[in-house]
Amino acid sequence: VQLQASGGGLVQPGGSLRLSCATSGFTLDYYAIGWFRQAPGKEREGVSCISKTGENTYYADSVKGRFTVSRDNARNTVYLQMTGLKPEDTAVYYCAAVFQLVRLRAPLQKETYDYWGQGTLVTVSS
């Protein structure tokens, strides 16, 4: 099982970025994918999650209305569209996967996930 986040970079406040999580080594159709971030000196926090079918999506309050998660199982890729970026969104962003049998109880908790990818750095600064 491999996941690789990409698409990070330097962006001005108010700008947008789209992160991608490329997956391999497993059938994405059966897995929920979560996005997490970790700022320097802070705990890793859940940002968003998308269920295996895409029917259910979840967002942290801090990003609701600004971030949108989506998935393309045919391309084995999950996306996180980020708009209205703020300096406090600066962090390393990670994607993670969990085999999903039933609806996730805690989709934004890192303990829910079994597989993690390398992160991608997002810096929001003028």
Image: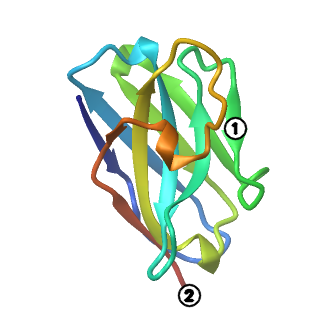
Query: Along the horizontal axis of the image, is 17 left or right of 118?
Result: right
Number of residues whose C-alpha sits closer than 10 Å to that of mark 1, classed few (under 14), some (14–19) or many (20 or more): some
Query: Along the horizontal axis of the image, is 121 left or right of 52?
Result: left
The relative height of residue 41 versus residue 25 in the rendered view (above or below) is below
- Give coordinates of residue 61: x percent, y percent: 78, 56
The C terminus sits in image quarter: bottom right
Q: Amino acid at mark 1?
A: Tyr
Q: Amino acid at mark 2?
A: Ser
The N terminus sits in image quarter: top left
- Give coordinates of residue 9: x percent, y percent: 39, 67
Q: Which of 40 and 85 lies nearest the eye of the viewer?
A: 40
Rendered image: mark on residue 126: 2
The relative height of residue 112 versus residue 61 in the rendered view (above or below) is above
Q: Find disc 1 in the rendering and name its residue.
A: 58
Q: Which image quarter: residue 78? A: top left
Q: Secondary structure at mark 1?
A: strand
The relative height of residue 69 versus residue 37 in the rendered view (above or below) is above
Number of residues whose C-alpha sits closer than 10 Å to that of mark 2, classed few (under 14), some (14–19) or many (20 or more): few
C-alpha span from label 1 to label 2: 29 Å
